[in-house]
Image: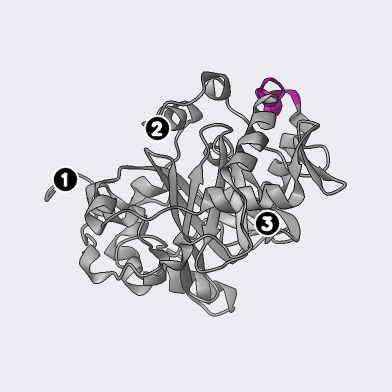
Amino acid sequence: MPGRPGLNNRPIDIGKINVGNTVINNRPSWVNIDRNTVGRMNNRWQTQMGGLHGWAKTRPGRVGYWRGWGDGVRFRWKGYHYHGRWFTGNWWYRHPGGVCRWHYYHRFNYYPWNYWWSRPTFAVAAGWFAWSAPKTVWEQPIYYDYGSGGNVTYQDNRVYINDEPVATADEFAQSAAALATVVPPESEEKAEEAEWLPLGTFALSTDEDDVEPSRIIQLAVDKSGIISGTMYNRETDKSQAIQGRVDKNTQRVAMRFGEDDEIIAETGLYNLTEDDVPLLVHFGSERTENYILVRLEQPDEAEGTDGAEDSEDAYDSEEDGSSGSQE
């Protein structure tokens, strides 16, 4: 599409990037849950939709808790506004570990690079999918809130949705892993046909003291509900593929990272349209932790061009105390 306004002036040649992560397409060895068990769990879950809809409006204190965590990153991380040209142009040639068979990089050349940093409203995201989903589930957004005082809680080895027991802790973790494991497309040509809606770019904070996160995540979703993304570690300069899926029966989103067999993160689709995204992270079926994704501001157009080649080096110079310009 030569000459398209805003098109990256160094478009990506996808033939130069090897699509090699196939481990992420296989169910983890610890997952043996069947469809009937998942169906029973989802049936119990759906009986709570009335209480889940509007949760964010009726629990401002809980929303404020997550916003406060996010503000710690926004206001205390000196690198928050310096994006280091992540996920732009030739960045992908230097970080090939961030792709897999289901990946939004197939569509990079159809849009300007900063398209993938943009955020949808919930209405846009909910109307994106080419599926027939229950209206009682999707008529309103669901804000999934994890931990004490939230609407997804653990007690006595059981998981409660809006105070209703829906599954054992083991079943809940396994169902998240099953949702996040996606059958790969039949061919690379099929993958290239997918259309992707960007969900944005986030910093991953693992606790309230983690105000200078090392991991940066970019996500998109296709019309069938497949989640594709990349996690970049700015300290190690390594990237990993993210793959997952949206559950049309609950608005639940579950994701897997790289070639890891244990770690599964879950949240809600509405959460991913907000600035502060609560995450429930499963480490196998043994334990869970609460993390947060903090949305990063879309960089200026100039930061994704050749003229900003030194922006990452400038940020690094500031961190080590040397005299580098950030302009």
The quadrant holding residue 86 is bottom left
- Say which of 41 and 300 sits in front: 41
The stretch drawn in magenta includes residue 156: no
| Residue identified by numbered label 1 | 4
Q: Amino acid at mark 3?
A: His
In the rendered image, the vertical position of residue 39 relative to residue 85, given as above or below: above
| Residue identified by numbered label 2 | 129
| Residue identified by numbered label 3 | 282
Q: Do the residues under discs 2 and 3 have CB atoms within 8 angstroms? A: no
User: Tag 3, which secondary structure?
Assistant: strand
Image spot of residue 95 (x, y percent): 39, 71
User: Tag 1, which secondary structure?
Assistant: loop
Image spot of residue 2 (x, y percent): 11, 51
Q: Residues within 10 Å of mark 2 (few under 14, many from 20)?
A: some
Magenta stretch, residue numbers: 49-58
Give me the residue at 71% from left, 39% from top.
145
Give me the residue at 40% from left, 32% from top.
129
Give me the residue at 52% from left, 19% from top.
135
SS assignment for the magenta stretch, majority: helix
Viewed as shown, does residue 235 lie left or right of 163? left
